[in-house]
Amino acid sequence: MVRLRPSVRAALAGHGVAEGDPPALLKERLNDLYLEEVRKLKARQRAGEIPLRDYAAHAEALKQRFPLLGLPLDQWQEPEG
């Protein structure tokens, strides 16, 4: 069984993603959550809640909430040994 780094486990838990599956599947679930948030953000912009000129800043802030997606899977795991 793969051991995830404590920081990765904490970040996943913060998004409500439970451990127990392989890291690739966990990353896929996290990506699905991110895409759902992107869709919500775009819907808010289209509804006029977020001015178009501010959309990029909101999108960047959202991206910053999901730093694990930019981390290679081998860095999700604790070193063997």
Image: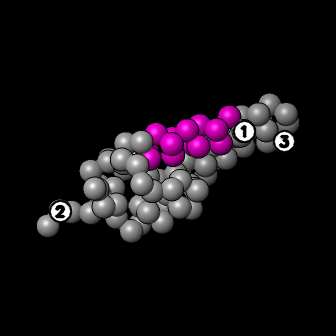
Q: Which residue is mark 2?
A: 80
In the image, the segment drawn in magenta is 26-39
**Left or right: where 39 falls relative to 25:** right
In the rendered structure, which disc, 2 or 3, sits on the residue that comes first in sequence? Answer: 3
Q: Amino acid at mark 1?
A: Lys
Instruction: Please identify the quarter of the rendering in which residue 54 is found.
Output: top right
- Residues 20 and 55: in front is 20
Q: Nearer the viewer, mark 1 or mark 3?
A: 1
Q: Which residue is mark 3?
A: 49
Residue positioned most to the right? 48
35 drawn magenta: yes
Label 1 element class:
helix
The quadrant in which the C terminus is found is: bottom left
Provide residue 23's location: percent of width, then percent of height: 36, 48
Q: Which residue is mark 1?
A: 40
Majority secondary structure of magenta residues: helix
Residue under the point 55% across and 47% down: 63
- Residue 75 placed where, x, y %? 29, 55
Q: Secondary structure beneath disc 2?
A: loop
Quarter of the image that includes the N terminus: bottom left
Q: Position of residue 31 (x, y in %)?
A: 51, 41
Q: Please tell me whether residue 56 is drawn above or below residue 5 in the rendered image.
A: above
Choose between 54 and 35: the one closer to the eye: 35
Of the residues tagged 2 and 3, which is closer to the observer? 2
